[in-house]
Image (cartoon, helix red, strand yellow):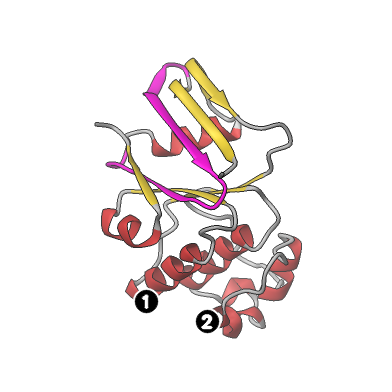
Amino acid sequence: MTQTLIVANGLVAGYAKPVIGPLSFSVGVGEVVGLWGANGCGKSTLLRAIAGNARIFDGDLGRPPGLTLAWQMQQPVRLDEMPLDGHDYLRYAQAHRQAPPNRLAPWLDQRIDTLSGGQFQLLAVWAMLGGQCDLVMLDEPTNNLDPTGEQLLTEMLQSQQGRRAVLLASHERRFLDEACSRILEIGR
């Protein structure tokens, strides 16, 4: 039986006022769950609520005690000058649970500030996936990715099925259909 990490029952969340809900769903270990909906429908707000950074107006959001999570926002932070290479970046993120995909290897010896936006995006996603967290949340992880980058991201996410829970938000349905074990439609 799969361990459930997140259980939402009638969840209504937002900031000064509700933005999303009511929603009821669960996410278990081993699932890669996509949140699909139009821009502005509340996908990011839902991730923020799970992380404890948005207000819950109604309903319940259950998490087991000690749940650890990694959360990549829509634009991962990268300074204009970052004298770290890819190895340093992954070491700093404690992304040593599993070796990165071979296709990331050429970027590991490069300085972070010399990588393209797509290369950095994929390395930042791996910094989340390669760590020890129980739940990884990715907000619009296809930002800056060309079709080849999206395919690599899909492979990276598929490699997580059965290992940990991944919850990702995107407005790109085709990507979610390929990368996820299940999709929750938001905003309908």
Q: Which residue type does callout 1 highlight?
A: Thr
Residue drawn at x 63%, y 81% is 110
Q: Is residue 41 magenta?
A: no
Q: Position of residue 47 (x, y in %)?
A: 50, 38
- Residue 175, relative to residue 19: is it above or below? below
Query: Mark 2 highlights which residue?
Result: 103
Q: In the picture provided, is 184 more to the left or to the right than 27?
A: left
Give residue 185's quadrant in the image: top left
Q: Residue furthest top?
A: 58
Q: Is residue 18 magenta?
A: yes
Give residue 108's quadrant in the image: bottom right
Range drawn in magenta: 16-40
Q: Secondary structure at mark 2?
A: helix
Q: Residue furthest front?
A: 1
Q: Residue furthest left?
A: 188
- Could you tell which of marks 2 and 1 lies nearer the N-terminus? 2
Q: In what quadrant of the picture does the C terminus appear?
A: top left
Give residue 178's quadrant in the image: bottom left
- Residue 44, relative to residue 180: is it above or below? above
Residue drawn at x 39%, y 67% is 145
Of 157 and 124, nearer the camera is 157
- Residue 91, relative to residue 26: is it above or below? below
Q: Is residue 12 visible?
A: no
Q: State the separation of the CA atoms marked 2 and 1.
A: 11 Å
Query: Mark 1 highlights which residue?
Result: 148
Q: Position of residue 68 (x, y in %)?
A: 69, 43
Q: In what quadrant of the picture does the N terminus appear?
A: top right
Q: Secondary structure at mark 1?
A: helix
Residue drawn at x 66%, y 74% is 99
Magenta stretch, overall SS: strand
**Mark 1 Cα shell of 10 Å, populated few (<14), some (14-19), many (≥20):** few
**Mark 2 Cα shell of 10 Å, populated few (<14), some (14-19), many (≥20):** few
